[in-house]
Amino acid sequence: MLEIIFPYRNRGIERVKKSLDALANQTNKNFSVHFVDYGSDIETAKQVEVLIQNYSFAKYQYHPTNFQPWNKSRALNTVIKQLKAGFCFVADIDMIFHPEFVARAITLQKENTATYFKVGFLSENETKYSKQFNAYSINFESTHEATGLTMFPVKALHEVKGFDEFYHFWGAEDTDVHVRLKNDGCKIVYYEKEILLLHQWHKSYRSKESQNITSDLQLGGVVRLNHQHLMYAGFNNKTSVNLCKWGEPLSKENYRSLMGFSGESKKILNRKEAIDFLLFCKLPEVDKTVMRFEVGLDDFQNSIKYKVKRLLGKKTPSYYTLKEVNDMLLTHIIAFYRDYDYIYRVFESENKIELTLKKP
């Protein structure tokens, strides 16, 4: 038996259908699919849930994390934590599977051994077509450095508490779990005898980065931050992570509680001293009572009086841009508050950031 896990959020319906159709054509039917929708917008979630009902081997689950940054690690851990034994395969919604993929993967299952697979990448134009697996023209192939498509023994993942939930947005969580499993004595094998997986083209995370705040949450420099965390795991021979808890997403009940908060919001302007006080004094005081902070622009920053005083060299307040505030807040959430119940919203047209949270 092979448990296949799809972490998903707001991706095109057509690529989902291509991936699941390829699984429907497997010669070996001894598999099941856990489709984890980690916070798609409501309309997309409805469409995907309806689509998945057409595949008897797939089970859909939704977590209300649409106002949290993408956390693939936690999405995967929600399933991994519930599995009892056997093997699971971490899939990608961009994958098109060879008809023999499941059959071949099952033959490769060995105790305390994780196996990851070479992938063929399709061009943007080739991705537009629906073909038989062997009819696709491959643009380039992955190397042993691409660790994202791996079959794991469930027992080994439980021993290291799954994927490290520090990693948010994009990058490094796949390599990190390989490093920690090796440190824990699990063998890692790269299967490159044949290509059993094709990757549908899409824009990279970095190509979509904006220098302004966006309602589609972003964090500047997060790829470099994740890489530093990966190197730390390697240098320090880390094995187990997620020491407080793991695989526990924001519940629907707590989501409703946060969204329905009707108490007084703490309004904060983007003056440097006010933001620093929020980060280093107010947030650490958050307890099991829901609190909401609203960060907006100080009108004085764009006033004639402010500009004149600056020209005359007089003392004026110092400010962070809202993008800088966004990046600092998200970094603090990832580092210190990722296990809290929280929602984080950016209102572009109002130049406002809203953080609602409580200690679990």
Image (cartoon, rainbow, N blue to C red):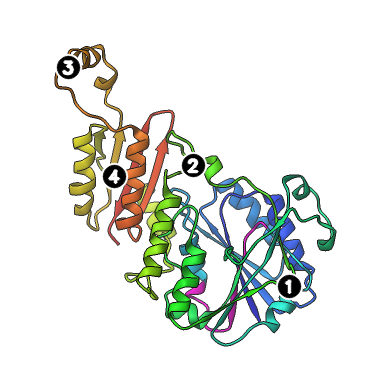
Q: Are marks 4 and 3 in contact (CB under 8 Å)?
A: no
Mark 3 belongs to which amino acid?
Gly
- Which of the two discs, 2 and 4, sits closer to the camera? 2
Residue holding disc 3: 313
Tell me if 150 is positioned left or right of 176 in this view. right
Q: Secondary structure at mark 1?
A: helix
Instruction: Name the residue at 64% across, 54% down.
Output: 48
The earlier-in-sequence mark between 2 and 4 is 2
Residue segment shown in magenta: 80-94
Q: Is residue 187 magenta?
A: no
Disc marking residue 101: 1
Report the label total: 4
Disc marking residue 292: 4
Residue holding disc 2: 216
Tell me if 78 is positioned left or right of 145 in this view. left
The span from disc 3 to disc 2 (Cα, nearest Å) is: 39 Å
Q: Are marks 2 and 1 in contact (CB under 8 Å)?
A: no
Mark 1 belongs to which amino acid?
Phe
The span from disc 3 to disc 1 (Cα, nearest Å) is: 69 Å
The earlier-in-sequence mark between 3 and 1 is 1
Q: Secondary structure at mark 2?
A: loop
Mark 2 belongs to which amino acid?
Asp
Instruction: Name the residue at 36% across, 64% down.
Output: 232
In the orientation shown, which residue stands out farthest toward the bottom? 111
Instruction: Name the residue at 36% across, 48% down.
Output: 330
Residue 158, image x, y percentages: 46, 79
- Neighbourhood count class around disc 1 (C-alpha, 10 Å): few under 14, some 14–19, many 20 upward: some
- Which of the two discs, 3 and 2, sits closer to the camera? 3
Residue 299, image x, y percentages: 27, 21
- Which of the two discs, 4 and 3, sits closer to the camera? 3
